[in-house]
Amino acid sequence: MADKLLIGISAQGATVGYWRERKIVECRTFASDEAGQAGFKEHLAQFPTVPVHIVVDAVEEDYRFETLPHAIGSDRAEMVSRKLKQHYRNTPYLSAWLLGRDSGKRRDDRYLFSALTNPELLGDWLQAVIARGLPVAGIHLMPMVTAGLLDKLAVKATNLLVVAQHAGGLRLTFFRDHQFRLSRLTRGESGKAESNTRYFTDEISNTRLYLHALRTMTLDEPLTVALIDRGDALQEAAAGIARDNPGLECVRFGRRDLADRLGLDEALLEASPYAIYLHLLGLKEPHSNLAPASVTVGYKRYQARRGVYAGCAALAAAVAIWSGTNLYFAWMLRGDTEDAGRRTAQLSSEYLEVTRQFPRAPTTAENLKKAVEIGQRLRESTHSPQKMMALVGRALEASPAIIVREFGWKYGTTEISTDGARARAPATSAAPAPVATSTGPASSRKESALIEGEVRPFRGDYRSAIAAINGFAGRLAAQPEVAEVQVVKLPLNVNPALSLSGNTLDNPEQSGSTADFKLLLVFKPGA
Amino acid sequence: MNQSDLQALRTPLLVLLAVLVAGALAIYFTAQLMTAARQQLLQQQAQLKQAQVRLQKSGDEKDIIVRYLDRFRQLESTGFIGEEQRINWLDGLRLANQQADLFGVDYQIGGQKPYPFAAEFNPGQLALNQSLMQLRFRLLHEGDLLRFFDALARQGGGIFTVDQCLLRRIDTRGVIRFQPNVSADCELSWITARIGAGPEQRKP
């Protein structure tokens, strides 16, 4: 838990308690004079940036219980602010505490308005704190802090009056059903035990009358008085109170008892009457913070800084966990890798041992097998013009008028060119070699041939010449392995799109005209 | 939040920024370490599996070596495996010319190139190459072409494929005697295999 500086301020002076590890480790009191102020400032100089919590014990305090129409958000804030200004015009130290909703039909909001009506009481002390740059977390009235005492005292009473002797007088705080209702600080103190008893009894009686007048509690109702006796000097007073007020139960809490219940050092209890309240303030921040925003701005920045630093710490922790997890997994994976490496090396050495018994080979078994299989497949897949020549030969036997002058053959992914023979010659074809793997599988290659020839004898009878060529082509096309036969060129172009000229008197034998043709023959892939 | 609030929070925000940057870097680098370690493990596991399979199949490997070694040596001696044996090819041409009773063969051999149809054979670590040979010769008749190729194949000078041929009838003006009647222009691919450059062959 963070360190705190707890300051109790009264008209008589200030008590400063340094809170560390859930307890007050140092407590000093400063009188309300120049020396006290100087000592106070000097004492504050020890604490660089510790948040300050202030409790004020003053006569000049005011409490009002009021109900306001139920509202939320800015409407509520505006209404409450207006109400506070209406009640307390001359002090910046005021507060509104929403107690709950009314049980009536309207279910109004119940508020406790409280204020320190003498701001000058705080003036110099608070100025010293702010001048020192210490963040002020809150300013609270003593009765609000006293509410925290009820749980510690564990007194089960509907009407409970906590009575304690303070530096400024006797503080009587009334709680009904554990809820604050009234508090008084009476000036005056008696030294003798006898007059002390009278003084206590009178003030308790006055308080009862006052409560009765306020209709907070009737005189007939039982009341429990919790007498805070930090100096173990009120045994007789407690007995006297009980004796003089039969309808009243008085429970005294001595120094040891208080120290045990609060977990407080007895020496601190003796040092200052405010040690109890500073301890309670350190344990829990009460409601009803009187400090205006101009006073708590430093604390808000302090909180924001701490929030950011806490975020940094959380982030760093998350990063550390994340990175640590990554490193752990990386380490585990490396371990697995090393293990796999060792096993691989072991298997490799076993394999080497086995291979020593192998016949000596120029390469791996896989390469041996592949090389032999590829060689075999290449030999088996070798193509030559033989098949196509045989097919053409068979067709020629049935076509004696067809004379072949040129026979071009190709085995490739493309068909043989149907251009002039010179262009098709291998030496000049520049081998339009298929591009590496873009050519596709073996079955995409096919055999093709270009047959150039003439019809002989030819006596100018184009009809019979063309019929002979077509017959020859038809015989070729009838073979099962043939995919396509295309007549590329005929002796006479009968295409109606082209012009045609000649002389019927010309003697073809004398004029040298021939019935030339060209046939493209393509085998099916894989044939 | 005003200017003075920001001023008050400057140091914590700078610290936060530094933590963010340092944290991001730490996470990034440790994640990189983990990723690298995972990849190394995957690689090592693959090698381990390979070693396991290799050891398991070592018996098969021995059988394969015994089964294929002789034929491999034979292919090596013919020149299919290893460096090109162009002298063997020329010797083969000369002998085939004699055996087919041709009238001489003109040849021209091009530079060695990767065999474009290598992928069809899934050569693995083998690199298949080809050298194109242009042949020009004259024949008594068309049948001599096939006899010539048969004779060339029998010489054992390597493996070749015939890519294209052009046969052209020579005008002898009707004279019948032992003379060339057909001219032939052919293109052959001499194919060789070399061990060790397979991947490039597969991915030209």
Image: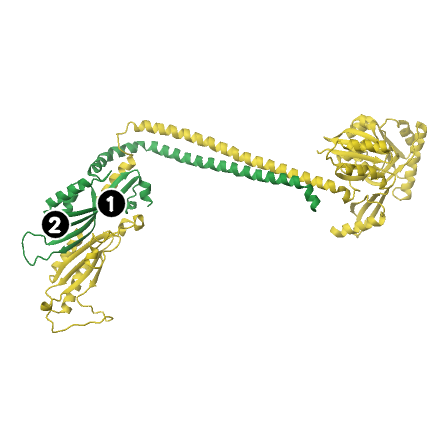
Q: Earlier in the sequence, mark 2 or mark 1?
A: 1
Nearer to the camera, B103 or B66: B103
Q: Position of residue A142 (x, y in %)?
A: 83, 37
Q: Which chain is green?
A: B
Residue type, mark 1 in image:
Gly
- The answer to whether residue A70 is visible is no
The answer to whether B87 is drawn above or below residue A389 in the figure is above
Residue A517 relative to residue A86: left or right: left
The residue tagged 1 is B111
Q: Position of residue B38 (x, y in %)?
A: 46, 36
Cα–Cα gap, marks 2 and 1: 28 Å
Residue B44 relative to residue A314: left or right: left
Residue type, mark 2 in image:
Asp
Residue A101 relative to residue A497: left or right: right
Q: Which chain is yellow?
A: A
**In which quarter of the view is residue A404 placed?**
bottom left
The residue tagged 2 is B144
The N terminus of chain A, quarter of image = top right
Nearer to the camera, B19 or B141: B19
Q: Are marks 2 and 1 on the same chain?
A: yes
